[in-house]
Every structure is written in structure tokens, then in C-alpha cells.
Image (tube, grey):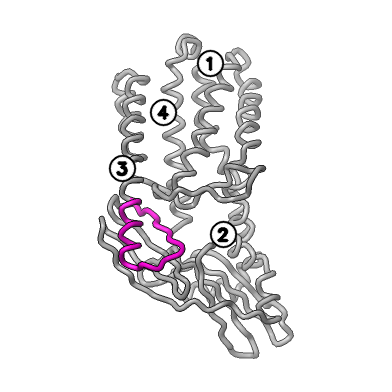
Amino acid sequence: MIEGMITLDSGTHFVMGIAIGGLALVDPTVANHTITFTAVMAGTIIGQQAPDIDTVLKLRNNAIYIRPHRGITHSIPAVLLWPLLITGALAIILPDAHLFNVWLWTQIAVFLHVFVDIFNAYGTQALRPFSKKWVALGVINTFDPFIFGIHCIGILLWLFGTEPVLTFTIMYLIIFVYYILRFAIQKAIKSAVHHELQDEEFVIVAPTMRFFHWKIAAKSKTHFYVGRAYRRTVNIYDKFKIEPIPKTELVAKAIKDPNLDAFLSFSPLYRWEISELENGITELRLIDLRYRSNDRYPFVAVAHLDEELNIVNSYTGWIFTEEKLQKRLQIGAGNE
């Protein structure tokens, strides 16, 4: 689920890079100098992708990927550094380009990447190094079909001869109105959740790819609630009594494992299960309540410990069947 969204999210950033390159034609230096325009277009496309370079960490494992993703690469120093690195590389390839203009539009592209990421449910650590707090306004899905689609339409109109600056200016004004509508809907749903639960202390209202469909995860003093909302109608599917995780030596050992540690750094709303398995193995499972899908909670962290409290294997990530999870644990996928 999330892995697929990351790929689609990269697609959105790609078309945004092209659109920003089109808007750059408002700059006379870019519009009147072909080499500079080529460098600017390359800079805006690369600049829209650069902050997500940490996605390559998934090639190792989820534990290494989850903790830093959208962290330091989206920080204030990184937002300032990426355009300099990209402009420097383009200066070697296209030495006749006007580098100030290349840097300026690349800087705009990088800034907009991080700024846009703030509005989805995953969020970023955009305030680093001043704060490691995740900023996630949660009004736009990681991949939003409307935003991706309207960019594609704008690019097609440009290819068919419309004036790019006017085309993309109108497009971004429409997107601005779309964001306002999303905020209004989110506020209405939070109000509906309060009306339904009354005693909630913490509520996550997360968007989906469908305009009026939202996911809900909430916490009161005594229970977790998981559900969905359609327009102002709230349906609570699951209710779990909150039970503090035991302060035992087994739990203390397990949560130091890189997979569980990464999960805990990422998940603000989760429940736990401890099970006794065969051959003296004990399983600690942490279950994120934000990602309910087809009656399952696919984002989990699992550790198996033997009788001496050694971690035999562990895993964190998105798994949609119990069979696949056990297969991952058997092959030691979490420790690769």
C-alpha cells in the first residue's frame, strides 16, 4: 500500500517538475536562452525528486528506511543544499547556462517538494534542525489523483500549444482552491468524530484517494477507535481497550530491536500483542491502527525472542496476509 504510494508520489513530483519548468518561462532569461531553459527544466525535475533520495534505503530494509524517510533530506539545510548540488552538476554539463536562474528555479522546485509533502498524512521533518517534530497536516493523500491528473492535463495543453505560464498559473490557482476544500472537509469530519465519540483526546483524520472518503484513528482515555468517514457520516469499525505495554525484560529487549525501534519512532497510535509460540519462542507484535485495510492492519512490527530473550528474528513493514508475514520472519527479512 505505502510502497505503491511512494512510486505514485514520485510521479506527481515528476509532473510538478515539468510544470515548474514551464512556469520558469515567465523569467525572460529562461525564455530567451535555450540552454538556460534546458538546464532549468532539468533542475526543476531533479529538484522535485532529490529530497526523496532516501527511498533507496528501502533496498536494505524497512527499519533503515522508515526512520529517516522525509527527515534530514527534507530539512531546512537540505532544502538549501540540494539546489546548489544540482546547479553545480548542471554547470558541468551545460556550462553556457545562466547559473543564477538555474539555481533560482531549482530552489523553487525543491522548496515546493517539501512544502507540498507537509500537507499529506505522512508529513516531513521540515523544521529540522530546529525541531524533529513531524509536520503532517493530513489533507492530501500521499498520491492524489486530482493533483496528478490536473498536472498531466496542463502539460498536455502546453504540448498542444497553450501558453505555459498562463496554463500553469491557472492550474495552481485551481489546486489552491482544492486544498481549501480539503481543509474544510477535514474540519467537518473532525467535528463529526467529536460528535460521535465525545471523549476523544487524539484524532487522526487521514485522506484516501477518494475525495469524500477519509480514514479515522482516535484515542480516548480508555479506548482506541478505528473507522472511516464519508462526508459527515462516521462509521467506527473497531474499538480496542487501551492496555499499557508490560514493563518486562522481554519487552525491554524487544523494543531495542531496530525493527521495533523504527516502528515506535513512526507510529503514534498502535496496540500490542504478546503470544507464546512453539519451541519456547515468544512473539511481540506492534500494530499500527492508522492503516486499516480490508479488515486488517497491515503495518506491523514483530519480534520473536527465545527463552534466553535473544531476538531470533524480526520484521517491520506492510504485510497484507499472515502467511506472508510468517514467511518474512522465517527468512529473516527484517534483519537483512
Where residue 298 appears, x then y in whole percent? 46, 68
The quarter of the picture where the C terminus appears is bottom right
The quarter of the picture where the N terminus appears is bottom left
Q: Dot 4: what SS?
A: helix
On screen, residue 166 versus residue 60, left or right, reads left
How far apart are the alpha carbons under marks 3 and 1?
Answer: 37 Å
Q: Quadrant of residue 182?
A: top left
Q: Quadrant of residue 276?
A: bottom right
Residue 197 counted in the magenta span: yes
Q: Dot 3: what SS?
A: helix
Where residue 234 appears, x then y in whole percent? 29, 64
Q: Amino acid at mark 2?
A: Phe
Disc 2 target residue: 266
Q: Amino acid at mark 1?
A: Thr
Closer to the chain start, of discs 1 and 2, is: 1
- Marks 3 and 2 in Cβ contact (< 8 Å): no
Disc 3 target residue: 181
How far apart are the alpha carbons under marks 1 and 2?
Answer: 41 Å
- Marks 1 and 2 in Cβ contact (< 8 Å): no
Give the number of marks.
4
